[in-house]
Amino acid sequence: MTEDEERATQDRPYTREQMRNACMQLIAAELTLAGNPAIKVPTFWPGYDVIAQPPGAEPQLISVKSCMFKRGEVFVSYLEGDTFDWLAIIMLPGDGEPKRRFFLIPRAVADAKARHDKPTATTERYYRIDEIAELFAEFEDNFILAREEPRA
C-alpha cells in the first residue's frame, strides 16, 4: 500500500510511519524538557527508539509504542528479546479518550504486568490498550524516569 492509499483509508492526514516517528520525537522532546536530554535513534534501530542521558546516570534505552485509544481487543506489544530499559506508551485520543496520554514504565514493571503468549508466538508481551491507564497509572507523565511506584 502506498502512503497515499494508506491516508485514503484513514481519517487522518498522515501515515502510520509518520505517526510513529512523531510519537518518538514527542517522547524525546518531553524527556529533554524534563531534564533528561534525549534523541530519537535512526529508524528501524533494533530494540529501542529513543536514548536518554539522565544527569549523572547511564544512558537509558526507550522503546516507544503508540496507538489510538480504542476499547476492546486492541493491544500494545513488544517482544521478550527486545533490548530497552523503559517502555514508553503513547495513547492518542479516540473512542471516548479525549486527550493524549504518556506512560514511561521501567522494563521490570512492564514485564511483570504484561500478558504472555506461548513461547512460539510472535507477540510475547502485551497489554490491552483500554487497561494501560489503570495498570500503569503511577507512571503516567513519568518523564523524570522514576523507577519506583510512589508510596501512599
Image (cartoon, helix red, strand yellow):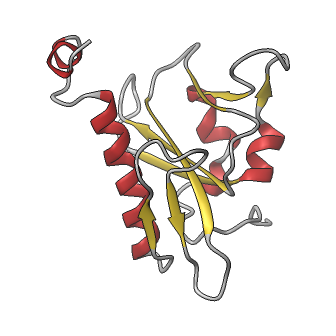
- Name the spot of residue 131 as percent of width and height, x first: 63, 30
The residue lying at 39 percent from left, 26 percent from top is 96
- Name the spot of residue 70 as percent of width and height, x first: 46, 21
Residue nearest the viewer, comparing 47 with 69: 47
When the figure is inspected, residue 75 is found, relative to residue 88, above or below; the finding is: above
When the figure is inspected, residue 87 is found, relative to residue 51, above or below; the finding is: above
| Furthest residue in direction bottom, as rendered | 56
The residue lying at 37 percent from left, 39 percent from top is 20
The residue lying at 20 percent from left, 31 percent from top is 14
- Name the spot of residue 57 as percent of width and height, x first: 67, 82
Residue nearest the viewer, comparing 149 with 56: 56
Q: On the rendered structure, is 74 left or right of 149?
A: left
Total numbered badges shown on the rendered structure: 0
The C terminus - image quarter: bottom right
The residue lying at 79 percent from left, 19 percent from top is 117
The N terminus - image quarter: top left
Q: Could you say which quadrant of the image residue 17 lies in? A: top left
When the figure is inspected, residue 129 is found, relative to residue 60, above or below; the finding is: above
